[in-house]
Image (cartoon, rainbow, N blue to C red):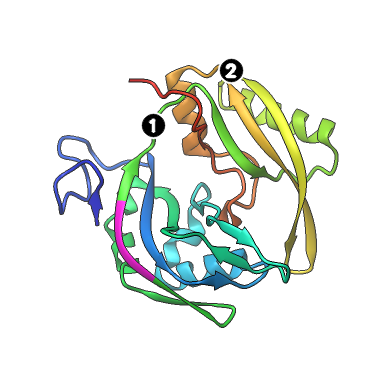
Amino acid sequence: MTAGERAPGACSPAGEPAGRDMVDVILDLVAERLPPDFEPALFREVARIVPWIARESAAGIHPVRGNRAADGSLLIARRAKLVIRLPRDKVCAASVLEQATLAVNGTPLRLGQGTYRRLQAAQTLYSPRVVTGDDDEVAFTETIEAEIRRLGVRGSLICGRRTRIAREGRELAAWSLAIHGLAAEASLVLQHAGLGSHRDIGCGILVPHKTIHTYD
């Protein structure tokens, strides 16, 4: 597995000791659709191949790009990728996912070649769904503000649309969330830690907002 901007074969950048910094591993994804509520099964299949990922509290799978069909299945977007956030010192260990075939609730999903990218600071971060266990927006916002304070980060929250996520017989309340006005170091702290829970099904994984410039 290679870094997108580095020479092939460099699992850890030269001159930088492997640590608990997080990176995004990006794998080609070959499938036409995924079944309804596929996220827990997808994580279990990934963990079948790399069992250590289940012990990494900040690791998770980014939401897969696609459109929902009437039956709740996900129609995979063209050139969609499987993107997994994990510790940088696990990049080489994650290379066993390349060319693997997963069975997601009976639906085959084939992975291709992988690369990884380091997280990049941005003044605004976004997650399409964040879960804290709270069921109303005021309590949700208070919980997130407390998490951010514990991380020593200062930023302004914009709480967006509320959705419901079905997970193994339960329904979870989730909100889209943007955090803006972040200093570069604070931006990276938040991306490394994530917010809320259920990282395995794509919740609380923060990425730079695409309309906001990143730091040089």
Q: Residue at x 46, y 37 (%)?
A: 192
The residue at which mark 2 appears reads as 154
In reply to whether residue 112 is colored magenta, the answer given is: yes
Residue 147 in the image: x percent, y percent? 65, 31
Magenta residues, as a range?
A: 111-115
Q: Is residue 140 above or below residue 34?
A: above
Q: Is residue 156 above or below residue 80?
A: above
In screen coordinates, is 143 left or right of 45? right
In screen coordinates, is 2 left or right of 98? left
Q: Amino acid at mark 2?
A: Arg
Residue 18 in the image: x percent, y percent? 27, 43
Q: Amino acid at mark 1?
A: Gln
Kindly identify which numbered label has been placed on residue 120: 1
Q: Residue at x 58, y 21 (%)?
A: 180
Q: In the image shown, does 29 or 206 lie closer to the viewer?
A: 29
Q: Is residue 145 above or below residue 1?
A: above
SS at mark 1?
Answer: loop
Magenta residues: mostly which secondary structure?
strand
Residue 178 in the image: x percent, y percent? 62, 30
Which quadrant of the view contains residue 152? top right
Q: Quadrant of the C terminus?
A: top left
